[in-house]
Image (cartoon, helix red, strand yellow):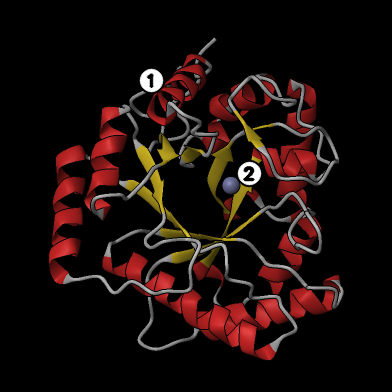
Amino acid sequence: MTDTRSALPHLPASQCLLGAHLSIAGGLENSLYRAAALGCTALQIFTKNANTWKERNLKPAEIDRFDAARADTGIRAVAAHTSYLINIATPDRNQRARSCAALEQELIRATALQISDVVLHPGSHMGSGETRGLEKAAESLNAVLSKQPPTTARLLIETTAGQGNSLGYRFEQIAALIEKVEDKPKIGVCLDTAHIFTAGYDIRTLASISDVMRQFDAVVGIKYLKLLHLNDSKKTLGMRVDRHEHIGEGFIGLDAFRFILQDSRLAAVPKIIETPKDAHGQEWDRKNLERLRSLLSG
Ligand SMILES: [Zn+2]
């Protein structure tokens, strides 16, 4: 990990853990080579098709190829994002059981691949109310994290835009969830700039992002912040709609990203873009990463 004191104020781009969410098409290990080709020092992937319930059992040869690619590329900071279908907060017992089983498989795959962090949306209460939703989510987390044999990957609760009945759009909800989790070392937070912004946290100026990070620290605790999703937003403040935009081209602008990239407390936290891929995905990733690197100093 980067020494946060000596690394700043002028953190070389090579030391910053900066990367993108990339495709595993053609094999899990290809995501690492794609990342290396983009100059990434961090990476996020799905370890299966995120839009289906169908599970994916990793074969030893796949794991070996992933390990080898990791050694080849030197990319250490790898996170996995869980399937979009998982809802650990639902009042429906069957759906919750299915979600917990899928989440367990996510942790098993991540552990096999030595992926340290697994990103999870806290889920939707489906009309049952926020209090009950948070209770169910916490119950689910405790059930999954106490499964035997234990998995080593840490679960990161992602801040959300708060669309519909989804939970996690207030730092207080994230804090309430963490408080209910028994195995604290197994839990962390992934903060997404686009999500918190449309959820109502104004981060458009250096002063406002600084204040929002202070709120995060006071309510959740900065020690729980293990991953950052750096996305601009197509939707403006408080709209509670989740639409990512290219860095500097949305309603957030560059100051929030400049602040995050230069804040010594966040130097060791991996930063991942999930910006639109459009027709020329690879080129856009390159452009967005370059924009962020240019904000590392000055
Ligand atoms: Zn995100």
Looking at the image, can residue 220 be seen?
yes
Q: Residue at x 34, y 59 (%)?
A: 115
Q: Sequence-wise, which precedes: disc 1 or disc 2?
A: 1
Residue 202 appears at what percent x and percent y?
81, 33
Q: Quadrant of residue 182?
A: bottom right
Residue 170 vs residue 3: left or right? right
Q: Are marks 1 and 2 in contact (CB under 8 Å)?
A: no
Residue at the limit of the structure toward the front, as seen here? 279
Disc 2 residue type (three-letter)? Asp
Is residue 182 among the parts visible in the rendering? no
Give the spatial CA distance, label 1 vs label 2: 23 Å
- The quadrant of the picture occupied by the C terminus is top right
Which amino acid type corresponds to the residue marked 1 in the rendered image?
Answer: Pro
Q: Report the front residue among 157 and 56.
A: 56
Give how far across and how far down residue 127 sits, in percent.
Answer: 85, 73
Is 124 located above or below residue 169 in the figure? below
Identify residue for label 2.
192
The x and y percentages for residue 275 are: 54, 34
Say which residue label 1 marks.
Answer: 12
Element type where label 1 sits in the image: loop
**Which structural element holds mark 2?**
strand
Q: Is residue 63 above or below residue 29?
A: below
